[in-house]
Amino acid sequence: MARISINKASLDFNISRNTLYKHIKQGKITKDSEGKLDTSDLIRLYGTHVNGQQETTGVGSNTYTVDEQLRQENQQLKQLLAVNEMLVNQLQQQVQDLKNDKENLFNQLNQKRIESKDQQENKRGLFSKLFG
């Protein structure tokens, strides 16, 4: 991303220098060792330039506008979101499967209890069945 001075950022984004320093101190904007600000932070926080210009940065032999870089980042974030949604769906399905397994086990346990109770009643003698 392009880096610009605090003075240029103040002029380009129509923000006072004091506000910029306050936002740097709060961590909303990052400042490098040369005291320059990242234009992507400025655009994210304040929107586009007052004069509507687009900053460009050189990356190797290719030159990208800030808009193109933001579109690429947006696309990557959409892909990550899709992956995360897929993982959430898988986890929800696993939770549902576990609930079904639990219900089946309880049903089996209850069936075994009923069978055991029937077997105990069948084992009682004739005298206990009659006068029981």
Image (cartoon, helix red, strand yellow):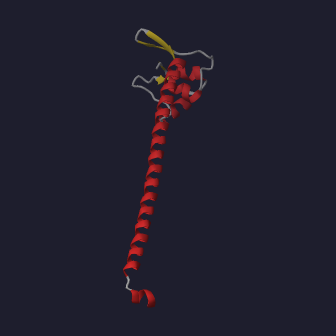
Q: Where's the C terminus, which quadrant?
A: bottom left
> Can I make out residue 6 in this image?
no
Residue 124, quarter of picture: bottom left
Of residues 132 and 126, the one drawn nearer to the viewer in this rendering: 126
Of residues 65 and 24, the one drawn nearer to the viewer in this rendering: 65
- At 41% from the left and 79% from the top, the residue drawn is 121
**Image coords of residue 50 (percent x, y):** 62, 20
Of residues 59 and 132, the one drawn nearer to the viewer in this rendering: 132
Which residue reaches farthest right? 51
- Residue 53 vertical position relative to residue 17 in the rendered view, above or below: above
Left or right: 27 with respect to 120? right
Left or right: 56 with respect to 60? right
**Image coords of residue 17 (percent x, y):** 55, 27
- At 48% from the left and 46% from the top, the residue drawn is 92
**Image coords of residue 71 (percent x, y):** 53, 22
- Residue 127 vertical position relative to residue 71 in the rendered view, above or below: below
**Image coords of residue 68 (percent x, y):** 52, 18
Count of marks overlaid on the render: 0
> Can I make out residue 92 in this image?
yes
Of residues 41 and 59, the one drawn nearer to the viewer in this rendering: 59
Which residue reaches farthest top? 61
- At 48% from the left and 24% from the top, the residue drawn is 37
- At 46% from the left and 34% from the top, the residue drawn is 83
